[in-house]
Image: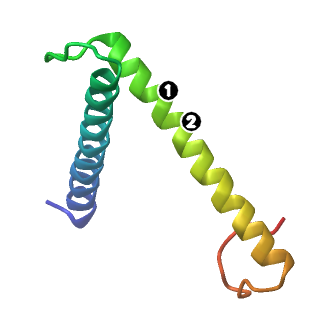
Amino acid sequence: MTDQQFLLKREFFEEAIQIRIYTTQLAELAVTLAQAAGEHVTRPLSAQQIARAIEVNGVETQLVLDALTERLQRLYREGKLPADAGVPRW
């Protein structure tokens, strides 16, 4: 096996692991939301329960990213980001 083949295989499995972690967290969120809504939770979860978790996760993720972007913009305007900070300059 060449180094390139090894790296491709390793990258594939690392990405697969990350996807599985993400889907597991979404499933846990779906269960939590279903229980909060008073729904009976059984496996496999329903498409509606999963869709609700995806929507909520998207909203929460966007809120966090917006807050982070706003913070970085403020630090940039105040000159508190180092020149090599590796973030976009607005």
Q: Which element carries disc 1, helix, strand or loop? A: helix
Q: Nearer the viewer, residue 71 or 13?
A: 71
Disc 2 crowd rating (10 Å Cα; few below 14, some 14-19, many 20+) is few
Residue at horizontal 66 percent and vertical 57 percent from the top: 67
Quadrant position of residue 80? bottom right
Q: Which element carries disc 2, helix, strand or loop? A: helix
Quadrant position of residue 16? top left
How many labels, in total? 2
Residue at horizontal 24 percent and vertical 40 percent from the top: 20
Q: Is residue 21 left or right of residue 71?
A: left
Q: Nearer the viewer, residue 79 or 60?
A: 60
Contact (Cβ within 8 Å) of mark 1 with mark 2: yes
Q: Is residue 57 left or right of residue 84?
A: left
Hey, what amino acid is under mark 1? Answer: Glu
Q: CA distance from mark 1 to mark 2?
A: 6 Å
- Please give the residue where the numbered disc 2 appears in the rendered image: 59
Q: Which mark is residue 76?
A: none
- Please give the residue where the numbered disc 1 appears in the rendered image: 55
The C terminus appears in which quarter of the rendering? bottom right
Residue at horizontal 74 percent and vertical 61 percent from the top: 70
Quadrant position of residue 5? bottom left
Residue at horizontal 78 percent and vertical 67 percent from the top: 73
Hey, what amino acid is under mark 2? Answer: Val
Q: Position of residue 63 (x, y in %)?
A: 61, 46
Q: Position of residue 23 (x, y in %)?
A: 29, 35
Task: Indicate whether 28 appears above or below 85.
Answer: above
The N terminus appears in which quarter of the rendering? bottom left
